[in-house]
Every structure is written in C-alpha cells, then in structure tokens.
Amino acid sequence: MANPITTYGNPILRKKAEPVAEVTDDLRKLADRMFGLMYSADGIGLAAEQIGRTEALFILDIPARADQDKEGLPLNPGVKMPLVIFNPEVIGASEETDVMDEGCLSFPGIQVSVTRPKEVVLRYLDRDGNEQTLNAKGLLARAIQHENDHLNGVLLVDHMTPVEKILKAGKLKTLVKQNKGAK
C-alpha cells in the first residue's frame, strides 16, 4: 500500500492552506482520519497538506513525558491533548529561541536542526468551531510552529543550511523522484 502521507517533492506541500469558513462534521471526520494516519506513522503532528488537502487544519498529540521542564513538571499545564486546530494564527512569539532537531512525516528519515521561538501564542478554532487562544512552551510551541509552517507552504528543507542540503541531497532526491508526476 502506498504511504498515505504526502512526502517531499509533491507540489501540494507548497500550497498555502485555505481558511475554513465553518467547522463541519466532514472536517471533524477529516481530523479523525488524520489522527489515525499520524499515530500509525508514530508522529506527534500532521497538517492537512501532508495528506493532500488544503484546509487550514493541523492536529497535535504531544506525549506528556515529552513536554516537561527539567524538574519533570508539565510545560503546558491545562492543555488537553490531542488538539485539533483550524485556521491557526500565531499572534505572539518569544524573542528567546532554542535549537532542536526536528523530523517530519513528509521527510522520512531526515532530521534538521531548526531555531524557533521557545514560546508562542496561538489563536485558532477548535474541533467545535470555538475560537481559542493557547500559550504554548517547549515541544508544543515547536510543534505548533512546525505544523503552521506546513499550512504556509514552508517545509523542513527551507530550514536547512546549504551544508545540510548537500549532506541530505541523496535522501531529498529520492523523495522527489518518488513524487514524479504528483499534482
């Protein structure tokens, strides 16, 4: 069976997402399908473009053990996982940044060091169509930024240094070759 997750080289990954006018049952079903695909690929986030869709939608499920401070306390207490996020808008970000290796389901087997703000404020519509504001830190903040990049056509390769692109050229070419003829 073909991988249902769209990989690098498919032009849909460069398309900017279209805002959702209304959260419908069909969109909730799409989000539920995305969770199944994400979990089967051992991911923590997935954007609609990654399954060939252009709705402004991404999902997240950050394991509690992966989003703790040095003392083991939750960085985002009160945030219930999983999250369904429609029409996300980052409305604030900390000046303080950190660098972490990121992977991506659309770039299997590739890790890239990415610098991002440590904290973000996100405004979005939840699964019920209610507007929410979320202050996020740590891995949750990073995942929000990563998935939001997808909705804006920004990919992991865009965060690579020229040297990283050279070092990963073989893997990138293989992904592009696998997507020849994709629309």
Image (cartoon, rainbow, N blue to C red):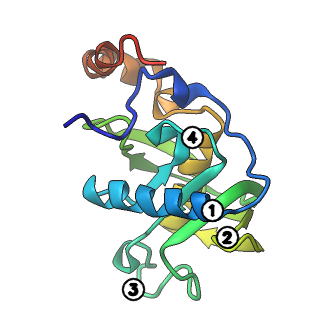
Residue 91 location, quadrant: bottom right
Query: Residue at horizontal 67%, vertical 70%?
Result: 126
Categorize mark 3 by other alpha carbons within 10 Å: few (<14), some (14-19), many (20+). few
The amino acid type of the residue labelled 1 equals Ile
Q: Is residue 146 above or below residue 182?
A: below
Q: Earlier in the sequence, mark 2 or mark 3?
A: 3
Q: Is residue 118 visible?
A: no
Q: How many marks?
A: 4
Disc 2 from disc 1: Cα separation: 5 Å
Residue designated by label 2: 126
Does the CB distance between marks 2 and 3 fall below 8 Å? Answer: no
Is disc 3 placed on a helix, strand or loop? loop
Q: Which disc is residue 72 wearing?
A: 3
Q: Is residue 169 above or below residue 33?
A: above
Residue 152 location, quadrant: top right
| Front disc: 4 or 1 | 1
Is disc 2 placed on a helix, strand or loop? loop
Query: Residue at horizontal 39%, vertical 43%?
Result: 104
Q: Earlier in the sequence, mark 3 or mark 4?
A: 3
The amino acid type of the residue labelled 4 equals His
The amino acid type of the residue labelled 2 equals Asp
